Amino acid sequence: MDYGNMLGDSFSYAKDAVWGKWVQWILLAISTIIFPLIMGYMVRIYSGVKPAPEVGNWVGMFIDGLKLFVIGIIYGIPLFVIMAIFMVPAFMAANGGDPMLALGSLGIGLLLVLVVGILIALISTIGIIRFAQKDSIGQAFAFGAILEHIGKIGWGSYIIAIIVLMVAGFVFGIIGSILGMIPVIGWLIMLFLYPVWYIFAARYMTLIYESAQAPA
């Protein structure tokens, strides 16, 4: 997997989506406020469209965004269950005057949330792109096909690719924070930078997905 080429492709993809297309850039910036819209636009990117799609069909974008939001909630259910199982006893122990038991329960719960959260993130990343490319919510939870696909990509290569994206996000965050501190216009700059990052990240994740043939 050529990570440098993937970063370059994603940057060019994001740049071509907004640079010189000022109306589209403004609409995408507004869409980040109405989050189902930007999520719906990302679904279009996940579908593998190239070059970047034009903004339009707002109802369709909104519905696709809601579908993606629902998928995210479903994937998050195990984390909420784990938190409930361990956090409630922790608070009860704390109120009962047993801080050590509370800390132990809290620590185990947080550790499980971290481990399960990482696993869910790895699986759901492929799942949401599979949903977009197959146009089926059910395909987001086709765990057999998802795990087979990750196996084709290679778990090591896949995890490294995700880490590279996280590093890119960290760099973007630093730059954005610095620009955001500019008096008066800082917030406006950030508003216009957010869609660029969303497009970049969505394209990068799609390239990860397409680096190996997806199972039927």
Image: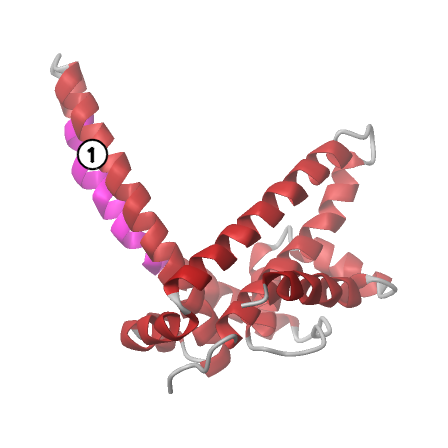
Q: Residue furthest top?
A: 97
- Span of residues in magenta: 73-91
Across and down, in percent, residue 176 comes to 71, 39
136 left or right, relative to 191? left
Which of the 4 quarters of the picture holds residue 86?
A: top left
Question: Between residues 188 and 121, which one lies in front from this camera angle?
Answer: 121
Can you identify the residue that label 1 sits on? 108
Query: Regarding mark 1 in the picture, which secondary structure is present there?
Result: helix
Q: Residue at x 78, y 42 (%)?
A: 188
Q: Residue at x 29, y 43 (%)?
A: 113
Say which amino acid is labelled 1.
Ile
Across and down, in percent, residue 40 comes to 57, 67
Q: Residues within 10 Å of mark 1 (few under 14, many from 20)?
A: some
| In the image, residue 205 above or below residue 191 | below
| In the image, residue 44 above or below residue 167 | below
Q: Is residue 70 visible?
A: no
Question: Between residues 55 and 99, which one lies in front from this camera angle?
Answer: 99
